[in-house]
Amino acid sequence: MGNLLRDFYLELNPLHILKNSNRGAAETFILFFYMVAFAVLAYKLAIFFLERIRPAQDPGHEYNRRKVLRMGFLILFTIIYLPIFFSSLALLPTVLGLAAAGIVISLKEVWLNMVGWFMIMGGNGFKVGDRIEIDHIKGDVVNIGFLKFTLLEISSDLRAEQSTNRLIHFPNYNIVLYRFFIVSDAMDFVWDEFKVGLTLASDWEKAEKICTQILQEELVLAPELVDQKIRELSKNYLVRLGKTTPIVYTSLEPEGFVQLSLRYLTPIRSKRINRILISKEILTKFKDESNIQIITHFKG
């Protein structure tokens, strides 16, 4: 009985299994379990002590730190563990056969995902926090992995630009197959247009003046902020933004009404709130003007 317990203990003892260079499949799986458990425990302890010694400044900092630490542990333990597993030469043909079969099955997508990851991390890629549109789907990047990236979906309604609270996972090879559009921190504002229809009998000149005043008082981005963003973007791209001040375009439409198009720069995440502010200001100021009538049956 004592010898049986001793043999059972030795079969489960990780140090004994590690010293044995002629391990069988069962012993290898047991050793693999021990190693994974040790790696996870070491990672958790590292995170625990790091948070105690130097807490994260904000959620973004904590996310990036955890991701770097996780990748570092993965690379470190892979380098340490591979020689241990391949030290058992009896299992080498089996391991190589399984690896070859897996490579044959998944080689195309794996390599494309790796190429996509390098493209994402390159100078023309994107990072967590950027807003991108790919394959007609728009969202904020919330995670970038070696094989896939994740978007927090944004509504397809161009007037809203608000989150649907749905996560969408894309394999990295989508970056190779599809073109994508980026709104990054380097240039986080876009042109938007707000259109107002007036009857032909309205005093369009007065309405144009009121709308211009609304844009200049409420929605003008600081010129130095725009210039700073352009300088940052110009480090990698030749950018000529041209006129950056808001403007009101007046046009006579074939359907028989006057259209005012209010064009202005807005931070991408403030697009909807700026439209609300414009709407309220227009309704408030046009309400006191008896010679300005808004029409609502046109497509703006």
Image (cartoon, rainbow, N blue to C red):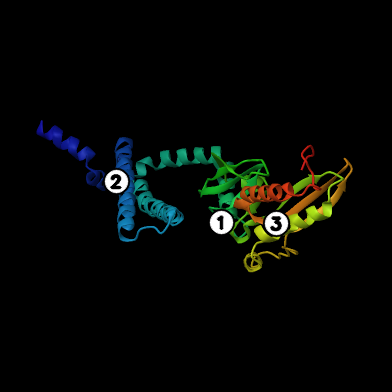
Q: Nearer the viewer, mark 1 or mark 3?
A: 3
Indicate left or right for 183 with 25 as reference: right
SS label for mark 1: helix
Determine whether 125 is above or below 168 in the image.
below
Label 3 – label 2 distance at C-alpha? 79 Å
| Residue matched to label 2 | 21
Label 2 – label 1 distance at C-alpha? 41 Å
Mark closer to the chain start, 2 or 1: 2
> Residue visible at 76% across and 49% down?
289
| Residue matched to label 3 | 214
Determine whether 98 is above or below 84 in the image.
above
**The one of 222 and 199 positioned closer to us in this rendering:** 199
Where, quadrant-wise, is the N terminus in this rendering?
A: top left
Say what amino acid the circle numbered 2 marks.
Ser
The circle on residue 121 is: 1
Say what amino acid the circle numbered 1 marks.
Met
* Labels 2 and 1 touching (C-beta < 8 A): no
Q: Residues within 10 Å of mark 2 (few under 14, many from 20)?
A: some
Q: Nearer the viewer, mark 3 or mark 2?
A: 3
Determine whether 221 is above or below 163 in the image.
below
> Residue visible at 27% across and 46% down?
18
Q: Residues within 10 Å of mark 1 (few under 14, many from 20)?
A: few
